[in-house]
Amino acid sequence: MEKKQRAGKKAALLLLGAMVLAALWGCAARDGVRPGEQYLLYVGQKGQSLVPVAWEPPEGDTASAVSQALDALRDPEDPDGYASPVPEQVSVEIRDLADGSLDLAFSPEYAEMEKGREVLLRAAVVQSLVQIDGVSRVRFYVGEEPLREADGTETGYMDADDFVRSIGPALNSYRKTELTLYFADGEEEKLQPVQTTVRYSSNTSLQTLIVEQLLKGPASDGYRRTLPESASLLGVTVRDGVCYVNFDEGFLSQDYEVSADLAVWSLVNSLTESGDVHAVQISVNGETDVTFRGTVDLGQPFERNPDLTAEEE
């Protein structure tokens, strides 16, 4: 019986994935959600698609983060072309949370939802909540009973893989990783290592992710950005242990808060942290015959410089 239920759940979730394929495809590229940012999913203006909206989880325990995410999903602030995936007449609360498994209890009105809207709600809620640290899978209850598929089998726990399997390289193909990025300290004299956990598309290389996070700047107070906001990343490739990073002319902006050396080795030390890259070649619009800010020659690859790192003073 248990084997039959698992097979029934798998078939139901594959059907669910097929139904949301058109709804989810391409929404990861929506303006306002940068690589690595967490987001919540809302229903698009026509009620047939899902829209990701950047969301920063609050500090505190997992249960508080889940509660605030559910509140935000039910009552979005200043919606522009999107609406809550949870109908107004449907309430939801945390039933249980332990060891990464989250149980949600929806009010009986959930069972009265039109199937298409229920599919969107399920995809939006699960994919939004599994981004929260401490939540890896979600199970739905309707009243006191577990959610069931049309054939009567329990839906059971749902996670990101249940959706990724069906929709391929769309919104849900995301991973988490911990990065060590180097930003300038408050006195602008040394580089400080800053650990950060980032959620990113599996189609994005680790080196591209690192550069994008440096361009985004530090999330914590006490550190200063090292790369200018005006810079755009044109490309990142790795060959024979050398990482080739190509910026547009915005990289040459003089509006820097840190020295030229700190700017360059913030990039180099961050990219060489893992050991997969041993040197970094920087170019501007594909050209390396550039003297960065009049002092640093970009003509040759740069190796790691521990002398500029505060931890090694």
Image (cartoon, rainbow, N blue to C red):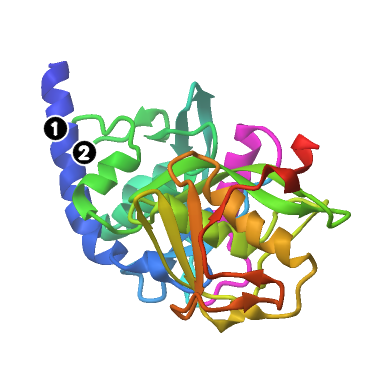
Kind of residue indicated by mark 2: Glu
Kind of residue indicated by mark 1: Gly
Q: CA distance from mark 1 to mark 2?
A: 8 Å
Q: Report the number of discs.
A: 2
Outermost residue on the right side: it is: 187
Q: Which residues are magenta?
A: 59-80
Q: Nearer the viewer, residue 210 or 53?
A: 210
Do labels 1 and 2 touch, CB within 8 Å? yes
Which secondary structure, mark 2? loop
Q: Residue at x 58, y 63 (%)?
A: 76
Q: Give residue 210's position: percent from left, percent from top.
A: 52, 54
Residue 117 visible in the current orientation: yes
Q: Nearer the viewer, residue 66 or 245?
A: 245
Q: Residues within 10 Å of mark 1 (few under 14, many from 20)?
A: some
Q: Residue at x 12, y 16 (%)?
A: 1
Q: Which mark is residue 8?
A: 1
Up-down: is 11 above or below 77?
Answer: above
Q: Give residue 96's position: percent from left, percent from top.
A: 51, 26
Q: Which mark is residue 149?
A: 2
